[in-house]
Amino acid sequence: MPCYNEVTTVAALIDRVRQAEVDGLEVIVVDDGSTDGTVDLLQGELRSKIDQLLVHQHNQGKGAALRTGFEHATGQYVIVQDADLEYDPADYPKLLSPVRQGNADVVYGSRFKGGESHRVLYFWHYLGNRFLTLLCNMFSNLNLTDMETCYKLFKRELIQSIEIKENRFGFEPEITLKVARIPRVRVYEVGISYAGRTYDEGKKIGWKDGVSALYCIVKYGLFK
């Protein structure tokens, strides 16, 4: 769980994670240089609910936080979970189903697939996500519907075998394109619910991150 300045949501989110219907859950939180009191909360009243708490002294970005978390993971599977309340840990069993059935090595949770509930928000974000997913599919030869989704599940040995270079949101296309190049890798998608938040509610991703993602798609799509 990468975490940056989420003091208003992280406690509720960790409670939801702990309530997920998954046995043997290991909660790893990587605070990425928060300045709003999140670290004090994590190190204080929430510490007993966290199996591993890792702290970056300075903000480095989501990709850097995930890189740290992946290095310390010990479970059979690894799920990426943002520290806000946009994604619901109740969807973990859906993500785990294809790998438990022996069908998948990687599972993406799609906000645009299936009949789950979705908060209706920004049209241009939706259009940007679809465009980036389409472009990434062209380079990866996958047919994903939501490359930019937070919910990505990996077999631990697989994700720990991949060198992650991007420090920010470029992680999403980078990891997708690198996964697609693994021989005989099996990638699945499942529909998930989504309760997106507004910028007033703390949403952080912006148009610059979209430009960066576009650059990363070309970078990792053309060069190995």
Image (tube, rainbow, N blue to C red):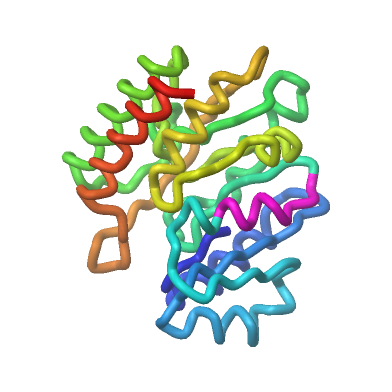
59 relative to 81, above or below: below
Furthest-front residue in this view:
223
Figure quadrant of the N terminus: bottom right
Residue 143: x and y in percent read 44, 16
87 to 3, vertically: above or below: above
Front position in the image: 223 or 203: 223
Give coordinates of residue 5: x percent, y percent. Answer: 42, 73
Vertically, is 103 above or below 211?
above
Q: Which residue lies at the image location 25% right of the left edge and 27% below the top edge?
A: 131
> How many numbered circles does the render carry?
0
Residue drawn 54% across the image and 80% down it: 39
Q: In the picture provided, is 35 more to the left or to the right than 199? A: right
Whether residue 183 sits left or right of residue 167 in the image: it is right
Does the magenta stretch mainly form a helix, a strand or a loop? helix
Q: Residue furthest right?
A: 24
Q: Position of residue 169 (x, y in %)?
A: 39, 48
Q: Which residues are magenta?
A: 66-75
Report whether 172 appears left or right of 208.
Answer: right
Of residue 64 and residue 135, the one placed in the foreground of this image is 64
* Residue 72 colored in magenta in the image: yes
Report whether 82 appears left or right of 17.
left
Identify the residue shown where x is 63% and y is 59%.
17
* Residue 105: quarter of image: top right
Query: Which residue is rendered at x = 69% and y = 41% of the image?
Result: 160
Snapshot quadrant of residue 182? top right
Whether residue 86 is in magenta: the answer is no
Choose between 88 and 209: the one closer to the eye. 209
Determine which quarter of the picture holds residue 30. bottom right
- Residue 178 rendering spot, x and y as whole percentages: 53, 28
